[in-house]
Amino acid sequence: MPGTEFRALHQKGNPFTLMNAWDAGSAKMLAAMGAQAIATTSAGHAFTLGRPDMGRVSRDESLTHAQDLVAAVNLPVSGDFENGYGDDPDTVAETIRLAAEAGLAGCSIEDTRMGDAPSAYDFDLAVDRIRAAAAAARALPRDFVLVARADGIMNGFYDVDEAIRRLQAFDTAGADCLYAPLPKTMDDLRRIIACTQKPVNVLVTGAFAHYSRAEFAAMGAARLSLGSGLARITHAMIADCGRTILNGDFTDFQRAARGAQIDAMLTN
């Protein structure tokens, strides 16, 4: 079962790398390279639709996208489902049920109210939303890994003390894995990992990309994720190579992967 297999990967002090894919092709390539599990990326998916990040993709679109990745690989797939596509706890619970029906092994739920002026949900509502999600996950006929995210540090809504307060409340509310993206320092990350006995996810980007898996393992991390990092690298290549090509310089084509190499990964 994908949920059971996915849960077993989450071991404090022995982190696996959750590879975020943005379409079926990237998922199949990552699986062919040895990925243990795949996750969607809300930003990367939005880019494929020609849209910016942050709440521009509907729940139905995200579920269909997730089903495509589940069908593409024989690995557990987790969904990056932003705020659960609604403010109220009942909507979040419904999203969990639909995620499981789509074949996902788990998904993450953020504490960010989407819209033109995003903000953090009030503490009590943020906890109620995770409690409803956890109840929905436990009522499923199979295992499902619920990740509760405290995104306020990354988004500038609150500090590490508030993030820890929320993560500990999410833990008590029934979340299986906890996640506060991009704390300000490694010391803050250590505090986050130490605040719970549950597995903690670390987003490996920005300053954190300078550290190794062994260093995150020594801190007690259980999971390392990429977010939209690989998708953004791909788009950086499009931007950089596209500029040189439009300026009449075609030498970047020498960096292209061979068709046979990609075909081999896609047919595994």
Image (cartoon, helix red, strand yellow):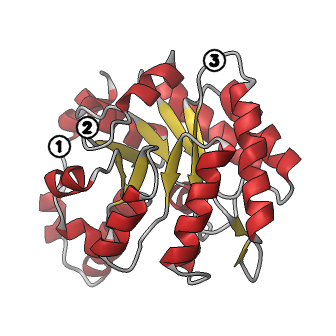
Q: Is residue 242 above or below residue 247?
A: above
At horizontal 49% and vertical 57% (from top left) the residue drawn is: 179
Compute the Cα span from label 2 to label 3. 35 Å
* Res 117 → quadrant: bottom right
Question: Do the CB atoms of the residues marked 3 and 1 lie less than 8 Å apart?
Answer: no
At horizontal 18% and vertical 62% (from top left) the residue drawn is: 253
SS at mark 3 in the image: loop
Which residue type does callout 1 highlight?
Arg
Which residue type does callout 3 highlight?
Arg
Please tell me whether mark 3 or mark 1 is closer to you in this view.
3
Compute the Cα span from label 2 to label 1. 7 Å
- For the C terminus, the image quarter is top left
Q: Which mark is residue 258?
A: 1
The residue under label 3 is 142
Residue 102 place in picture, x, y as percent: 67, 28
Q: Position of 3 compared to 74: left or right?
A: right
Q: Position of 214 compared to 203: left or right?
A: left
Q: Which mark is residue 262?
A: 2
Q: Is residue 85 above or below residue 54?
A: above
Q: Is residue 232 above or below residue 42?
A: below
Would you call the spot at circle 1 few (<14 residues within 10 Å), some (14-19), or many (20 or more)? few
Would you call the spot at circle 3 few (<14 residues within 10 Å), some (14-19), or many (20 or more)? few
Which residue type does callout 2 highlight?
Ile
At horizontal 25% and vertical 79% (from top left) the residue drawn is: 244
Can you see residue 151?
A: no
